[in-house]
Amino acid sequence: MAANNVPQKKEEEYITNKVLIVFSLCLGGVLLLMGVKNLVSNGVSYLAGITLIKVLIGISILGVITGLFMIIREIKNHINTSMKIITGRNVLLTFAISLVIFVLIYYFLFPVFKIFYAVLPALAVYYLIYHSYQPEFVAIAFNGGVAAVLLFIIKRAISSANFKYLTYASLAVMVVYLLAQVIIVNKIKANNGTLKLKNKEYNFNFSKNAYTMLFITPVIMTILVAVGAFTSMALYSIFAVAAYLFITAVYYTVKLM
């Protein structure tokens, strides 16, 4: 029995370490962005801030190249990376995200800071949800995240005469998302919890009421996005999305106990 638990404990430790590293990277990223913003916000240190951004872009490019070389080496030498954190794919992904962030900051500067102040913590939270909660709650949380982002876009678009078309575009995106999820969930349900894509088969360990929640949640999110699009209540719709996610998070957290 003790021997059988060893692989499981190793996997749990591996996942815990991955989550901690992702949280640390996201927190470090936010702190770094704050430091860069303070530099470019001050006339005296503006040039130093721009230079730092260029250096960070260069480091990110080197990181991407390093990640690619590591992937090639892993494939060539048939290295098993299933239980390793520092792998070519992880290095490539980390520095690719870093490159995108700093390139956007270099070209657009201040508007980008606010976006990534929210995006980086959100990435950390979703990564925790992915590794800690049931598959259906991962989908539910993603539904809420998509709806919240679209409502935020709607809120900004309504206040600008030049970008009002984004209001209806956002609603259209949510409707397409709703239809896509309903089709995919129907396929999974029809195949007894499996989804076949080309030659690959994905198994989903959904709970008893999962399908009901996966059908209802995108409908509720679409209704809330529609309310935000056709009224001046986009902010209240965002609060409603947050409340729905909080209630479902409590429900699924209790189920984990």
Image (cartoon, rainbow, N blue to C red):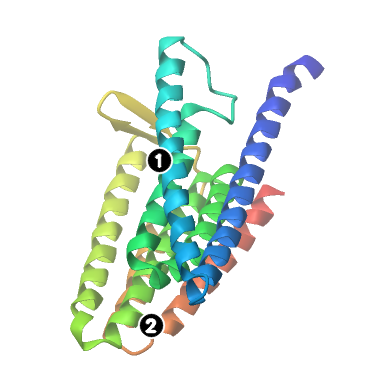
Q: What residue appears at the point 45 percent right and 76 percent down from the top-left corner?
A: 238
Secondary structure of the residue carrying numbered label 2: helix
Which is nearer the eye, 140 or 130? Answer: 130
**Residue type marked 1:** Ile
Q: What residue appears at the point 22 percent right and 67 percent down from the top-left corner?
A: 172
**Badge 2, how many Cα within 10 Å: few under 14, some, many 20+?**
many
Which is nearer the eye, 14 or 249? Answer: 14
Image location of residue 115, percent across then percent down: 44, 67
Instruction: Tell me the quadrant of the picture where the N terminus can be found.
Output: top right
Secondary structure of the residue carrying numbered label 1: helix
Please give left or right for residue 71 compared with residue 44 in the image: left
Q: What residue appears at the point 62 percent right and 50 percent down from the top-left corner?
A: 23
Up-down: is 188 above or below 99?
above
Which is nearer the eye, 13 or 44? Answer: 44
Is residue 185 visible in the rendered image? The answer is yes
Q: What residue appears at the point 47 percent right and 70 percent down from the top-left corner?
A: 46
Image location of residue 14, percent across then percent down: 65, 32
**Residue type marked 2:** Ala
Which is nearer the eye, 64 or 22? Answer: 64
The residue pinned by badge 2 equals: 234
The residue pinned by badge 1 equals: 61
